[in-house]
Image (cartoon, rainbow, N blue to C red):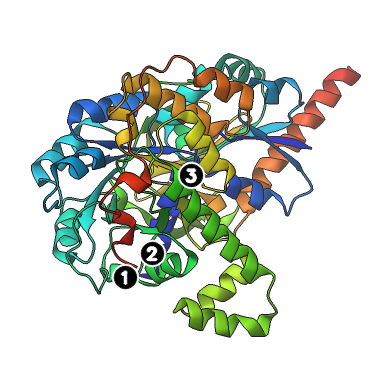
Amino acid sequence: MNIGVLALQGGFVEHIRMLKEFNVNCIEIRQKSDIITHHFDGIIFPGGESSVIGKLLRELDLFEPLKKMIECGLPVFGTCAGMILLAKHIVNDQRTHFGVLDIHVRRNAYGKQSGSFKTIDVFKGLGKIPMVFIRAPYIEKVGENIEVLSVINNNIVAVKQNNIIVTSFHPELTTDSSVHRLFISVIQASNDNKLQKIDV
Amino acid sequence: MKDRSELNKNLAQMLKGGVIMDVTTPEQAIIAEKAGACAVMALERIPADIRKVGGVSRMSDPKMIKEIQNVVSIPVMAKTRIGHFVEAQILQALDIDFIDESEVLSPADDLYHIDKNKFNAPFVCGAKDLGEALRRIEEGASMIRTKGEPGTGDIIQAVRHMRQINQQIRQIQNMREDELFNTAKNLQVNIELVRYIFINGKLPVVNFAAGGIATPADAALMMQLGAEGVFVGSGIFKSGDPAKRASAIVKAVTNFKDTNMIAELSEDLGEAMVGINDQEIDLLMSQRGT
């Protein structure tokens, strides 16, 4: 299984480290040639600054090809800035990026670094897991096809829409890999679906 | 407090692969954010001008820091003098995202650094070698940067520091476990920090390059030497076309191994900052605080 990790800026190494315990092949995506020369079963958008990653995506000609891949159903896992990149609506920012995920998200919703926090709370299907929020966003409103996976203090912090999973928090900064495991199961289900289609 | 210290190291992790730019006005901060800065350092004068003007340089006016906080969505950092814990308290009161206890400003204390463990806000500190880096981490720094000579446009010192720190890390990795105690003694740090390096082959916090970075090639050089990101001070707003140069440096940091791309990025950037060689300067700021 090939998982692409967007490696333009931010905490991508932490995702790659966490994926080591699963039998997957990680590919860093830094420029267009990285997506031309590989096949991907899934892709991860890490945390970092969405303004930086969004700009580099466009300037390095990664934006359009990745958008197409996501629209064609490529499984995506976005953490923090990754959630912002995928959101259809950003409440406090005029820029949007891929705009494929039907959510209204607020950037830096917990304020500056002083508002960053760690907690242990419920994630649908995974029980209680550790969650690290760093200048994190949260979701204020979701569309119809969104499955809410976690709510902290009345704010939505994790959702799923078809093959897309996003979290406000950083599972890759903890030692609990259950959200990554969930993402890999989404990839497996998506691959099985594709095979069935071919059989038909 | 332990959680807070972890969260602060985590913020530094999210800055990796990015460029932190010195800015002196809200206008410059906006240019920096648009050019792809992952954070800005708000200061009254960039190091090149601090050098030129001379005299005592202090923490920036809180009003100016607030104005910059108001116009950007990325993290805002600001500098305190070495050992000046009240300036640091003020910066924390301003809800700053990161405090740089910086040799660029005039030191307030020639013996003691700030006890950064007492603060909620994260700190970044400069280091010329591994001992200095680990002493700062013991005092509570969440991020380390080289102490390259600021405001010179001369990369030599940042290169020296990055090589030195990474060489010392490799030496520790190659030691027998029973030799770590003596290393801890020589570096004047806790054995647990030395043990961390022995096991992990890296500092327990993020390590950036800072001081003298003026071109995309400088930035890529530091990344290839093992920096996890870069600070660019005078190099941007002392150059002919700040927005273009800033943007080129950002891309060079992401694709630091792609020499074709860096060649292209280096084209037609306008005038680089003039710079001074490290032998020509009277004041070596990296000697401040050890």
Please name the residue that numbered disc 2 is placed on.
Answer: B5
Residue B39 visible, this orientation:
yes
Label 2 CA crowd tier, 10 Å (few <14, some 14–19, many 20+): some
Please name the residue that numbered disc 3 is placed on.
Answer: B16
On the rendered structure, is B133 left or right of B111? right
Residue B112, percent from left and from top: 25, 73
Residue A98, percent from left and from top: 50, 20
Residue B222, percent from left and from top: 51, 43
Q: Name the chain letter of the residue that bears numbered label 2.
A: B
The single residue placed furthest to the front in the displayed view is B280
Quadrant that contains the N terminus of chain B? bottom left
Please name the residue that numbered disc 1 is placed on.
Answer: B117
Q: Are marks 2 and 3 on the same chain?
A: yes
Quadrant that contains the C terminus of chain B? bottom left
Q: Indicate which label's residue lies in the foreground, 2 or 3.
A: 3
Residue A28 versus residue A174 in the image, above or below:
above
Q: Quadrant of residue B273?
A: top left
Identified by mark 3, the residue type is Lys
Is tag 3's residue or tag 1's residue first in the polypeptide sequence?
3
Helix, strand or loop under label 1: helix
Identified by mark 1, the residue type is Asn
Identified by mark 2, the residue type is Ser
Q: Name the chain letter of the residue that bears numbered label 1.
A: B
Label 3 CA crowd tier, 10 Å (few <14, some 14–19, many 20+): many
Viewer-closest of B54 and B236? B54
Q: What residue lies at 55% left-to-right and 79% top-to-bottom?
A: B183
